Image: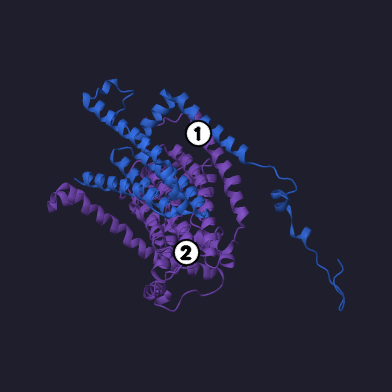
Chain colours: A purple, B blue
Amino acid sequence: MTDFFNTTVGMSYGWAWFVATIIGILVIALPLMLAVAMIIYADRKIWAAMALRRGPNVVGPFGLLQSFADGLKVFLQETIVPAAANRGLFLLAPIITFTVALIVWAVVPFGAGVVLADINVGLLYVLAASSLGVYGVILSGWASNSKYPFYSALRAAAQMVSYEVAIGFILISVVMWAGTFNLSGIVMAQQSTLNLHINAFGINPLLFPMAVMFFISSLAETQRAPFDLTEAESELVAGYQTEYSSMSFALFWLGEYANVLLMCALNATLFWGGWLPPIDWAPLYYVPGIIWLFAKMLFFFFVFSWVKATVPRYRYDQLMRLGWKVFLPLSLFWVFLVSGVLMLMRVPVAG
Amino acid sequence: MIQAIAFYLFAIIVIGSGAMTISSRNPVHSVMWLILAFFNAAGLMVLVGAEFIAMLLVIVYVGAVAVLFLFVVMMLDIEVAQLRAGIARYAALGLALAAGLLIEIVIGIKAWSAGTLQVSRRLAPTDTAVPNIQAMGQLLYTRYLFVFEAAGFVLLVAMIGAIVLTHRQRGGVRGQNISRQNARRPEDATRNVQPPVGQGVQL
């Protein structure tokens, strides 16, 4: 697109790059907002169906416009900043949550070469950006100057830092198998895994346990049930969001679901072939890659909702035990195992 | 042009947020300014082509160290006035450090401008076409393998040391036995009884 603005429209290279990047960002961010609105509706419908309820069905056909009605409602509400709150950080916190949820999408490949920033440290960028997510929660809890949000912030900080360690090791084993940190490279490395004509690392018996652990860790990382202790309504009112109202609350809400969608995309990209069709069979490549990616993301989102509807919440010490005493040693061991197998197979590592 | 704009933007924010880190009154604000400084320093590293170091800076310092820092600072009840009193006491030391750093910068610039850089005399120049993750890997795991391993070993010792220093065995604690908790079935824990009408349950 930079070339188009540079040669056809006749801008200088700098401006052409600038305009092309801005358009690229908008092309990802705006549909993402729409997708978040629809995915909230889907979440509520799936949850309702599992509880034998109807779910939202009043606003628009089948209640499809429910999320937009909710959005309009919070938009028209008054923004209340508690008198005792630390005003600057209180307003900064939801902005951080929302921004961090958006910036990771820059490296997610939607198709062959369809990616905003095709950087060779893509996966490290994902880790770096997701480690920022914790600041929105900690700051909102602290700046609210209220007890329950603060408890929630402490829980969130401990939880997200713990699971990031395990996620890091899981990603390392994927990176070793793929031989690259670039997300497009990881997708391409999954083509016909083990020569079985299936495009997914997940079918590799060595990486399947990692896929399962990554899915569970992504539940913990996005603070979805059964790890939603940061907003456990039975203990902490609404956790770190308790003091928020209007758009500042809506930003948390959007950021949370954008993060969930992102984790679905990462699950699909890292272990289940990303934009490649599930089976390595030529006619399937005529379907655009983005459709395969969306199908996989929707599947993972359904599983996220399914877990939310059926699994009871973890106790906090159990959560910590799972993170530090089960996932961390297991994923560390798996890094040894994968590198050992790669050594034995004498895979020619690049470089 | 865009690179120049980005450089000056990042550089100004690094210096500004560094200044705010030491001058802001609220310790939590200080940590937030520090995080902003880390972040923009990472931006500068991306500009000079060291994207791997930049990402590690964000993951390690912003993602882990600063979180713990923020954690501690939020829990502490720091008296700002007390901190202010310390400034006068340590002013001499601070100025000495600043002077030392200034001298180092001047020596560095003088040495750099003394003559052209002799690329062949540099230690292990790497190919510019190699991405810097691979370049670092090739150096760390071949030429500097033992230094790298030794650094890892020092970190391990430090970690064990921290655990030894802080871990206290307390007596009389009823710890959890996870496997026994998991092995417990409803049949072991509950019992159905059908007491006659008018009588309580006999336990």
Q: Nearer the viewer, residue A3 or B106?
A: B106
Residue type pointed to by label 2: Ser
Check if mark 2 and mark 1 are on a common chain.
Answer: yes
- Considering the numbered disc 2 on the image, is that residue within a helix, a strand or a loop? loop
Image location of residue A84, percent across then percent down:
46, 67
Q: Classify A305 as above or below B195.
A: above
Q: Classify B199 as above or below A87.
A: below
Q: Which mark is residue A144?
A: 2
Q: Residue furthest left?
A: A10
B161 relative to B182 in the view: left or right: left
Residue type pointed to by label 1: Ser
Q: Classify A323 as above or below A302.
A: above
> Total label count?
2
Nearer mark to the viewer, of 2 and 1: 2
Q: Nearer the viewer, residue A337 or B165?
A: B165
Instruction: Tell me the residue that label 1 is attached to.
Output: A339
- Find residue B118 and report its image quarter: top left
Residue shown at the point (40%, 73%) measured from the top left: A74
Task: Give the CA distance from mark 2 to mark 1.
Answer: 46 Å
B79 relative to A321 in the view: left or right: left
